[in-house]
Image (cartoon, rainbow, N blue to C red):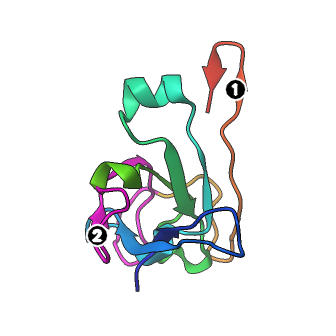
Amino acid sequence: MPSHMWCELNLSNPETAGPWWAGDLSISIYSVNDYMFEIPGDWAASNTPGKLLATGRFRDGGWPGQGPSLYAIGPWNDGNPPALYIRLDATTLLHYGSSYTPGGHTMNNYHHSDEWSGGTWLTSKDKSA
């Protein structure tokens, strides 16, 4: 099942586009589509040119990873709108090893019952995350 789409803010005429998958086959559907937020333009220009949206997920059970995931995407780079069912180019910003892959990286104090939702980009003076 695809992971992303877009629409206009006018819900009486949403003009939907999509759906699409975020990234290549290595990105699990369980690693995306729980949170999405803007990446600051200056940071994106230096680190993820053309990709101004962060998308990710932290689901229980370790299926997508044993910690939160975060990917930078810019659907408009693949068309305006992109063709149906394509895989959008994605840059990995944060990803932990899966519970299915022995020896992968695990977040400190991770537990399979952990599940978080939501995200934001924080900036204070010359630092951001």
Q: Which residue is the site of mark 2?
A: 83
Please name whichever residue, 27 or 95, is drawn nearer the observer in this view of the structure.
27
In this picture, is 61 found above or below 89?
below
- Residue at the (37%, 61%) spot, across then down: 81
Quick check: 23 left or right of 13?
left
> What residue does disc 1 label?
123
Q: Position of residue 94 (x, y in %)?
A: 47, 49
Residue sitting at x 26%, y 71%: 25
Please tell me whether residue 83 belongs to the stretch shown in magenta: yes
* Magenta region, residue range: 79-105
Between the residue at mark 2 and the residue at mark 1, the CA separation in whole angstroms equals 34 Å
> At label 1, which amino acid type do we have?
Thr
- Find out whether the residues at labels 2 and 1 contact each other: C-beta distance under 8 Å: no
| Residue type indicated by callout 2 | Ala
Q: Secondary structure at mark 2?
A: loop
**Residue 18 x, y percent position in the rendering:** 42, 73
